[in-house]
Amino acid sequence: MQTMTKPSSLRNLNQILLLLVLVFVIMHYAQQFFIPVAISGMFAMMLVPVCRFLERRKFPRWAAAASSVLATLLIILTLAYVLINQVIVLSKDADIIGERLNLLLEVVYNFVLDHFQYPIDKQREYFQKQIAGLSDSAARYVGAIFMSVLSGLVNLLIITTYTFLFLLYRARIMRFVLMLVKQYDGGRRDVKEAKDVVEEITGVASSYLSGVFSVVAILSVLYTIGLTIIGVDNALFFALLAALINVIPYIGSVGGAIIVVIYTLITGDSLATPIIVALFFTVIQQLDSYFLTPKITGSMVQLSPLFTIMALLLGGMVWGLAGMLLFIPFLGVLKVIFDHVEELKPYGYLIGAK
C-alpha cells in the first residue's frame, strides 16, 4: 500500500510543478494580454467601494462605473501632465548639469591619475568611447521609445475599458463564481463561504491599493516640503518621482533617495546638500516603514517579508516592472483564499506575517 502511495504522491507533485511552470511561461509570453487584464482587475476592485457609494446615491450602475473610472483616469493624466512639465523644466538645466559633470569627471581623472598612475588622456579616450556607444544606442532606441509611448496610450485605453466593464459586470462575475462552487461542491454553506471569500478578496485588494496610493500622496507632500526647504531644484519632480518609486517594496524607497542624492551631488556646490538630503530621506523612510505603511496598508495585506521579496523578484522575471507592482496584491489575494480553504490553511500561515 505504501509503495503505491509514494509514486502517486510524486506523480501529483510533478503534475503541480509542471502546471506552475506552464502557468508562468504562458503569463510571460502572453503578458501583453494578461498585464492590462490584471491591472484593470486591481483598479476595478479598488473602485468597487466608490461604485457602491454612488449606487446608494441612486446612480445607475453604468453611470457609477463610468464616473469612478473617469475620475481615476483624470487623476492619472493630471499626474502624468505634472511629471512631463517637470521633465521639460529639468531639461532646461541640461547645460548646467553637463558642466558640473565635466568638473566631476576632472576630479575623477585626477584621482585615478594620483592613485593608479593611469594617464588622463587614456581615461578620456575610454570614457568618450563609452559615451559614443551610448549615443548610438540612444539613437537606435528613439523609435522604440516613440512606439512605447503609443503602446502605453493604447494600453491605457484598454485598461480604462476593461476596468469599466469589470465594474459594470461585477455582479455577473460574482454569480459565475458561485455557480461554479455550487456545481462542484453543492453545499449552501460552501456557496456562502465562497461569496465571503470573493468579498474579502475585493476588500483586501481595494484597501491595499487605496492604501498604497494614500502613502504615495502623503510621501509626495512630505518630500516636496522637505526638498523645497533644503533648497533642491525641481523639488516637485523629484518628490513625485521618489514617492512613485516607493510603490516598489524595499527597493523603491532606496532607489528614490539615491536618484535625488546623485542629482544634488552633481548640481550642488558642496557635500552638505547631498548629506542633508540623504538624512532627510532616511528619516522619512523610517516614518514610512514604522508608521505610514503599517498603519495604512500593513493591516490589509499581512505578508511575510520573505515571500514579499520572492513575489517581487518573480513578478519582475515574469512581467517586469508591472509584475513587481502586481504580484504583491496577487500574493495577498492568494493568502485570503488559503485562509478560507481548510486544506490550504498551512500555506496561508506560511506566507503570512503572523
Image: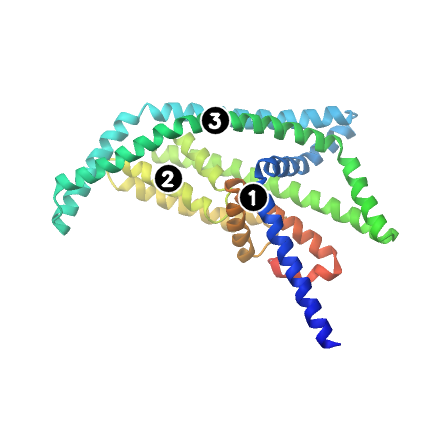
What's under tag 2, amino acid-wise? Ile
Which quadrant: the N terminus?
Answer: bottom right
Earlier in the chain: of badge 3 and badge 2, it is 3
> Residues at badges 2 and 1 in contact (C-beta under 8 Å)?
no
Residue 58, above or below 115: above
Which of the 4 image quarters holds residue 205?
A: top right
**How far across and down, in percent of the image, does residue 297 sit?**
59, 46
Residue 107, above or below 312: above
Residue 234 appears in view: no
The residues tagged by marks 1 and 3 sit, at their Cα atoms, a distance apart of 21 Å
Which quadrant: the C terminus?
Answer: bottom right
Q: Residue at x 68, y 38 (%)?
A: 45
**How far across and down, in percent of the image, does residue 142 sit?**
39, 27
Crowd band around label 2 with a 10 angstrom C-alpha radius: few (<14), some (14–19), many (20+):
some
Residue 105 appears in view: yes
What's under tag 3, amino acid-wise? Met
The residues tagged by marks 2 and 1 sit, at their Cα atoms, a distance apart of 30 Å
Label 1 sits on residue: 28
Q: Residue at x 74, y 30 (%)?
A: 168
Earlier in the chain: of badge 1 and badge 3, it is 1
Residue 290, above or below 205: below
Label 2 sits on residue: 259
Q: Residue at x 27, y 36 (%)?
A: 266
